[in-house]
Amino acid sequence: MPDNPEPYATRAWLLDGPIHSIPGILNWDGSMLTFIAYGGGTFFKKRLIELLKGFGEPTSSVEAIFNEEPTQVFGFDREAIQSYKFPWYYFKQGVKVTIQGEQLRFSFIQPQNTKLPPRLFGVVISEAVAKASVAHINAEKADGKRWRSIFKAITQ
């Protein structure tokens, strides 16, 4: 088995369907991939409960998510991560990851129909950069490049 890549974490949005997303932190701690939500984003409560159940997380944490308390949505070890793809139409700013047979989609750039939760300001890139019109694009592309190398190492 190849060496584990170094720990890394970035802001990310877990995407669901054409319009739903949850803001949070995608984190590789060296052995596990986790997603920590910082708010319910554009999800309805019912769909978020289904998502938590599917990941084996307690559905009681849905209230904490909607209160913008940092809450784990999933945690998987490297063996659960089967494949990844950086589609061209994400412009290096998003990834599709297959984990235990289920494909999850993440954007490293804020979707247009969302607002950034106050608790996520200052994470990875500064608030000033996040508010700049296009200055953040290179930072998110760099995040995509780093995640590509992590997923490559994990899935070998």
Image (cartoon, rainbow, N blue to C red):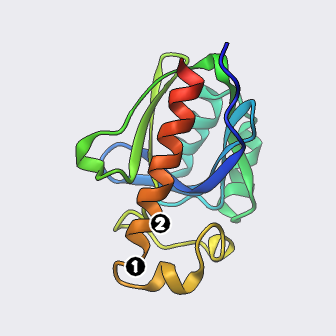
- Circle 2 is placed at which residue position? 139
Label 2 SS: helix
Q: Give the crowd class for mark 2: few <14, some 14-19, many >=20 residues within 10 Å.
A: some
**Residue at the image point whose x is 72% and y is 32% from the top:** 32
Q: What residue type is labelled 2?
A: Ala
Q: Where is residue 28 in the image (x, y as percent from the top left)?
A: 68, 41
Residue type of the residue flagged with mark 1: Ala
Q: Where is residue 94 in the image (x, y as percent from the top left)?
A: 40, 48
* 81 is higher (above) or lower (below) than 22: above
- Residue 93 found in image quarter: bottom left
Nearer-the-camera pick, 95 or 13: 95
Left or right: where does residue 143 sit relative to residue 75?
left
Kindly state the secondary structure of the residue where label 1 is placed. Answer: loop
Q: Mark 1 points at which residue?
A: 135
Q: 138 above or below 102?
A: below
Horizontally, residue 13 falls left or right of residue 134, namely: right
Residue 134: where, in percent of width, then height? 34, 78
Q: Residue at left 56%, top 50%?
A: 45
Q: Which residue lies furthest to the left in this view?
A: 89
The answer to the question of whether label 2 and label 1 lie on touching residues, with beta carbons closer than 8 A, is yes
